[in-house]
Image (cartoon, helix red, strand yellow):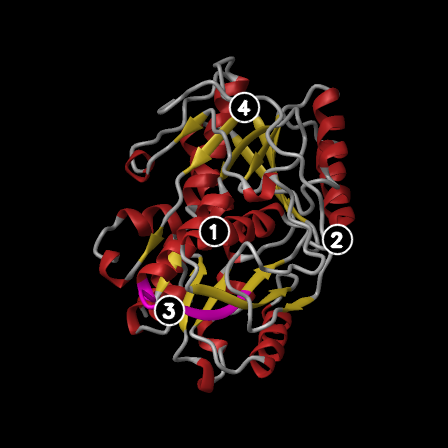
Amino acid sequence: MPGDRKCKEGFFAMTAASVAVLTLGMQTANAESLDLQGFDLTTADRTPAVCGSSLAVADLASYKAPKAKRPYTIELSVPMWIPYLQDLQYGAAQAAKDAGVTMTSDAGKGFQDPAAQITQLENALTHKPDAVLINPSDSEGMAPSIDEIIGKGTPVFDVGTMSTSQKSTKVVQDDFRTGEAGAEALAKLLPLGGQGIVVAGPPNATWARRRLGGFLETIKKHPNIKPIAVVSSDNSASDGLTKFSNAAQAHPKFDFIFVSEFFLLQPQSIPAEFRKAVYVAGGLTSVTLPALKDGTASALMLDFGVSTGYIGMAVAIHKLNGDPVPALNCIPTGAIFKSDLSNPIYFQTNMTPEDLAAASK
């Protein structure tokens, strides 16, 4: 596999946090003085990952799944069918097709309900799959279930979001780097600086905490980029909009909106009086692509959901085939601007054909 190097054991000690809306004083200068008021980011949440295998964007187009040595059945378990996880499922299904294996998939009832995902997964395990790909709803809360599955002889692969399990193989973006890319995009877009609202997502989700951690650590290098409110919400567009609107009413003068993942606050849903703010969010989709083209969105952090699903399935097949597999496999990160849309690789690795067709209408 491209870019392999020795991976440290242990990865991260994740701690779930609980928070609603965090409104910060106008005097906030930078990440050092930012009072998070209970959003309990650990040192790991604020630290880049140490990857065993790191892929560049250029590697993604040529990456191919191996042929399976026998007709494996592989289960994909996700918390819910949000756009990113639909992209991930599509990529995993393409790899399964290329490799000659069967993929089944099940979803829970949301990131705030790990019990529902565990129940779905337990039902799927009665069919005795050869391996499990999982995007865990709760990185810490689901680790015991993951360890139990592995202990009974079924390998588990975290895809897209890592659990705190020390036993599962992980195929993920380093979400710290994603937050970092968003912060650097804002610094480029606002060379004179500015203050803004951060829509961070569900605090029990690894990706949300690490994207926030990467953002806050990176703006230490750009003290003129000042968050004045941090909003936490479940993966619900209505909840995100309500929380954002409350923060915007409390702090009506702001220059940017940083959204960890676009479905938390879609660019088209922002009230007209706030649309002059620079909008930077995660996800290249049929919703955000038109926004990037027309200027409603200024930059997008790339998720590479299709590639993450494809490579996650490919890594699982490699391991089932008996090939050596690094413990932590990192998908690339980065942010794009309108000027980058001429490069087709961003569409191939981030968007399903249906999503791309919808965006082109």
**What x and y, as percent, mark residue 80?**
63, 53
Quadrant in the picture for residue 34 = bottom right
Residue at left 28%, top 46%? Answer: 345
User: Is residue 324 on the magenta stretch?
Assistant: no
SS class, disc 2: loop
**Relative to 154, 310 lies left or right:** left
Quadrant in the picture for residue 320 = top right
- Eyeballing the image, is 275 above or below 79? below
Start-end of magenta stretch: 189-198
Residue at left 46%, top 70%? Answer: 195
Residue 297: give its label: 3
For marks 2 and 4, the one nearer the N-term is: 2
Residue 154: give its label: none
**What x and y, as percent, mark residue 156?**
63, 28
Disc 3 to disc 1, how far (Cα)? 16 Å
Residue 327: give its label: 4
Q: Nearer the viewer, mark 3 or mark 1?
A: 1
State if disc 3 and disc 2 touch (CB < 8 Å).
no
Q: Nearer the viewer, residue 302 or 7?
A: 7
SS class, disc 4: loop
The quarter of the rendered structure image containing the C terminus is bottom left
Q: Which residue is mark 1?
A: 179
Disc 4 to disc 3, how far (Cα)? 36 Å
For marks 2 and 3, the one nearer the N-term is: 2
**Residue 1 appears in the picture as rendered:** yes
Residue at left 70%, top 27%? Answer: 128
**Relative to 283, 148 lies left or right:** right
The amino acid type found where label 3 is placed reads Ala
Q: Nearer the viewer, mark 2 or mark 1?
A: 1
Q: Which residue is mark 2?
A: 113
